[in-house]
Image: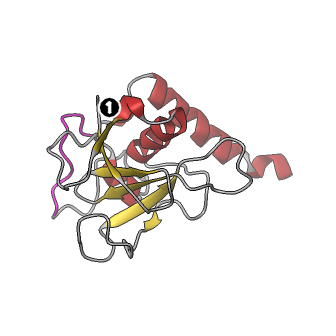
Amino acid sequence: MRNRSILPLLLTTLVVLAMVAFGGAGLLGGQTDGTTPDAGSSRASTPAGTATSPAAKQSAPHRGANPSSLPEIRESALPVEGRRVLALIRAGGPFQYGQDDQVFGNFERVLPARDRGYYREYTVPTPGEPDRGARRIVAGSGGEKYYTGDHYATFKYIAEGS
């Protein structure tokens, strides 16, 4: 009976890997034109009967102008673990850590000021670290994403799709 409890996790992981391998969110009918769902919409486009996490609303890459005065980093220049986390954000998870997809308070005030709940954070694993490490991606509900390699001291805007 114990093996049955991990079956849903294994199936979800296989689906995410297949989505990453075959082009990401487009497989689920998500938007692939760089836009995000309407602000008035309570759900992103998902198959019937599936839950929509806040991360699922981040499904399409943000290709707009940098909304901050922060330096940019190309998506292709992120560590490989960071690119994997971006794919998971676009797919709506699953995420490795319980703290992922939680509200980021922006207490350091490095990111542009927004209402509480606008930003969500995700762990970018660091090989060799015994814990979550210092690397994170923070995603805004407008679709923009930022990378920090030093636990929120500095951020770079992620130029997705480049």
Q: Residue at x 54, y 38 (%)?
A: 81
Q: Is residue 5 left or right of residue 52?
A: right
Mark 1 crowd level (few <14, some 14–19, many ≥20, 10 Å Cα): some
- Residue 24 location, quadrant: top left
Q: Amino acid at mark 1?
A: Gly
In the rendered image, the quadrant that contains the C terminus is top left
Residue 133: image location, x then y, percent: 62, 55
Q: Which residues are magenta?
A: 30-39
Q: Residue at x 63, y 56 (%)?
A: 132
Q: What is the residue that sits farthest to the top in this orientation?
A: 22
Residue 56: image location, x then y, percent: 37, 51
Q: Is residue 159 left or right of residue 13?
A: left
Q: Can residue 67 be seen from the camera position used here?
A: yes
Along the line of sight, the residue nearer the viewer: 157 or 6: 157
Q: Does residue 32 show up magenta in the picture? A: yes
Residue 74: image location, x then y, percent: 32, 34
Q: Is residue 63 left or right of residue 59?
A: left
The residue pinned by badge 1 equals 26
Along the line of sight, the residue nearer the viewer: 125 or 14: 125
